[in-house]
């Protein structure tokens, strides 16, 4: 009786091991690698404009750097960025900086990046960032974004 019961348990363990074993796939040399999607760079610059707005949190603190990147035609040498930050329909900070433009021949113009100093903002509520741009030749542009800042 014990021999029969032991044989059944042994067959059950071997069967479970067989069915739960990792499935083998084709050898690695035959596997095709999936193409990696690369972001499409912005096209040629035709006027003063924002390309991207984003934020960078300071880990462990409710402080954030807000940034905007964009481009301008060849000619101007600097751009003035004014960022107005609102939370709960109230302006909580305004930051103005004058940034030099950097030549970007592959885009037929100049590029810039404006960032605020570290701002203490409330996390997890809608934060609206309005950006007003003006280059040293008088061209103007605006852009806006709404972020939900992460909790520290």
Image (cartoon, rainbow, N blue to C red):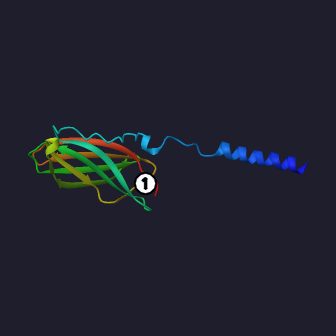
Left or right for 109, reference 125 = left
Q: Residue at x 43, y 62 (%)?
A: 61
Identify the residue shown where x is 35% and y is 51%: 55
State the residue position of label 1: 122
In percent of width and height, residue 14 lies at 72, 47
Q: Quadrant of residue 89?
A: top left
- Residue 90 in percent (x, y) is at 37, 48
Who is closer to the viewer here, 22 or 93?
22
Report the front residue among 39 and 149.
39
Residue 45 or residue 85, whichever sits in front: 45
Q: Residue at x 59, y 46 (%)?
A: 22
Q: Position of residue 73 (x, y in %)?
A: 13, 42
Image point (29%, 49%), residue name: 84
The reply, left or right, for residue 118 in relation to residue 122 is left
* Above or below, comparing residue 62 to residue 45 in the picture: below
List x then y, in percent, for residue 142: 24, 41
Check disc 1 and report its element: helix, strand or loop. loop
Callout 1: few (<14), some (14-19), or many (20+) C-alpha neighbours within 10 Å? some
Q: Is residue 78 left or right of residue 129?
A: left
């Amino acid at each position: 009786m014990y021999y029969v019961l032991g044989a059944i348990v042994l067959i059950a363990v071997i069967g479970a091991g067989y069915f739960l074993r990792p499935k083998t796939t084709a050898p690695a040399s035959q596997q095709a690698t999936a193409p990696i999607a690369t972001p499409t760079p912005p096209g040629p610059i035709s006027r003063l404009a924002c390309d991207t707005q984003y934020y960078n949190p300071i880990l462990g603190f409710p402080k954030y750097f807000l940034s905007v990147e964009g481009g301008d035609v060849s000619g101007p040498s600097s751009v003035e960025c004014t960022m107005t930050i609102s939370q709960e329909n109230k302006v909580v900070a305004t930051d103005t900086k004058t940034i030099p433009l950097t030549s970007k021949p592959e885009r037929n113009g100049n590029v810039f990046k404006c960032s605020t100093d570290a701002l203490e903002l409330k996390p997890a509520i809608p934060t609206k960032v309005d950006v007003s741009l003006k280059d040293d030749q008088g061209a103007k542009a605006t852009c806006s974004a709404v972020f939900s800042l992460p909790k520290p």
